Image (cartoon, rainbow, N blue to C red):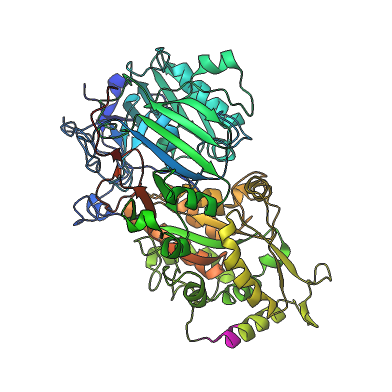
Amino acid sequence: MLNNIRFSNQRHMLKSSSLVVRTLFTTTLILSLHLILSATGSDILIGKAQADNQLAKNQNAKERCGYSAIHKLKYNSSDKHFDYVNPSAPKGGTIRVNRLGSYDSLNFLRYPGTTLVTRGQIPKDTAAFLFDSLLVVSSDEPSAYYCLAATSIDVTKDLSSVSFTLTKSAKWHDGKPVTIDDLMFTFKTLKSQGPPYYRQVLRKITVSKTAHDTITYTSGRKGDRSFVSLVGTLPIHPKHFWEKNGLKQKSMTIPLGSGPYRIVKATAGKTAHLSRVKNYWAKDHFTQKGRYNFDEVVFNYYRDNRTALESFKTGNDDIRLEDDAVAWSKEYKGPSLDKGEIIKTSFPSNDPGKMIMLTFNQRNPVFKDRRVRKALALLYDFEAANRILFHGLYTPVKSAYGTSELAASRKATAEQQALLKPFLNKLPENILNQPGPDLENNKLTSRQRIRAASKLLDEAGLKLSGNSRIDPNTGKPLVFSILYMNRRHQRILLHYAESLKAVGIELSIPELEAFAARKKMLEHDFDMTILQWMPKMLVGTSEHLLWGSQLADVKGSYALAGLKDPAIDASITAMQRAPDWQAMKSAAKTFDRIFRWQIHAIPLWHSNEEWISTSKSIETPEPSPLFETTYVDRFWQKPLKQSSLK
């Protein structure tokens, strides 16, 4: 039965009076955010979409239940699967995933506790292996979601409210049906007791049961384009299971799920074994076809990168994600690679890419002065670092949005000038004429960089006494402590420390366990930190969480920089409330221009591809640029007889 999005002006809408429509929008965060080409690579979907905030009545009977806030949906009811999967992929076999770090809890609802769902690991969408959601993201569209546990969506015109009708087909692994009460329980628990990300993004959203099969979410902010996709992709948890077993902060109790896999065995910090569910309720669903092909998925954890890599090369694992350019270039050598037993593949991405940056904690009064931030930015020589440390594998980065359509360029347009006008007296004078300051000027020698930085520090009142800069707020030598979670970042920090030493600043690089570093980061107890940011093409949410002033004073928030920049706030608001794609793109360009000119972070490097290595027994689809690149769920094992699991 075909179901489509419906559109209503009423806060709580009746299905009989709703207009059937095709909507336009969606987003995810992550700390962790893309412009994209169509599946043929010939057309830019966003550019062709003619996005319009006024959602027109849907005349097409072939439309599939789905939601996009900025473009027409690609798939309709005649499509049997996503184009980027292999619907004929054989089922069966085992894939062993090489993971870095540890975990100490299987309670995905409560925090603290480190679970299998961890940023920077593969599969990226681990929760989707275990728990279903109302909507599923499409990876080959800029911003599109299709119904899984939902059969229809009702969205208000101002995007302040959305109602989902729950399918009768969804079942927990114990055979009981998924209910609206489960959805209510999931939302309320994540909002009050979940990981920091959920507590932040759900805090102004409320929920109500508007029918036995319908749930309505109401946003505290009208026009929030990420709202529908945010609540629609929440992993659903079973109320009856947790009421029986108790909801503890940390628990190794194997949870009940409804997804394509269940956890069958887990040893905290070491391994976790997932088994494909026989007769999974959605195995033939449009969004699941050609996916989740392995009978068994095993996560093997390693404490450090070197141990993890060596274990992988000796055949203990089947897939590994590499995030270190030097390792990718120099360390993937040995008999297993020489014999072709391990295959290296670069998967391109169509989004703005991944940017690694040094972020200032502007709660420290020293960093409130732009001259100090500019001086520290001048002292980072990307070309030298890329040549010496990264074998030239990275590209120069200026924009937070890489080389995508969202990046600021040339002079500010009339629309961008209008947004900037109220703040011009507090912004750098050349902001309207150039997209950003030329801090990466390759013509500057090392000595020239040091002289320019020293002059700025002098002007900011950080005078040199002997070999040390003096902090005027404390009268003591200036020492900055940098927080980081990846030990491989040490070499770039040591390289940077030498540059700071030349102007009389000491850089402290304490080595902390990942959990301790994460705790200090969320408590905002640092001077500078390394942040990995992956912006999405659907802008607004991550920018609000990371750089908006509303969360700057909230302990545990992702507002690591503690930014309170009115111009940044105005551009974020403009992104979130943009009536169409062009307005949203203009607002993003304005944000990028302000962010670069105000030097709120120091870009270290940027990458638009991900490096994946697999054993030769693993078959992967042809690498093609996607918006939401996923692994494991789209792979399969070869050669293989068809599994007995159906």
The residue located at (49%, 44%) in the rendering is 99
Query: Is residue 334 visible in this depiction of the protein?
Result: yes
Q: Quadrant of the N terminus?
A: top left
Total marks in image: 0
485 sits to left or right of 28: right
Vertical order, 579 against 111 (above or below)? below
Main SS of the magenta part reads helix
Q: Nearer the viewer, residue 558 or 390?
A: 390
Q: Quadrant of the C terminus?
A: top left
Q: Magenta stretch: residue 380 in it?
A: no
The residue located at (24%, 50%) in the rendering is 622
Q: Nearer the viewer, residue 530 or 365?
A: 530
Query: Is residue 223 visible in this depiction of the protein?
Result: no
Vertical order, 559 against 467 (above or below)? above
245 sits to left or right of 309: right
Residue 123: image x %, image y %? 42, 41
Q: Nearer the viewer, residue 461 or 233?
A: 233
Residue 635: image x %, image y %? 30, 40
Residue 106: image x %, image y %? 55, 29
Q: Tell me the magenta residue range.
A: 444-449
Residue 129: image x %, image y %? 40, 31
| Quarter of the rendering containing residue 226 | top left
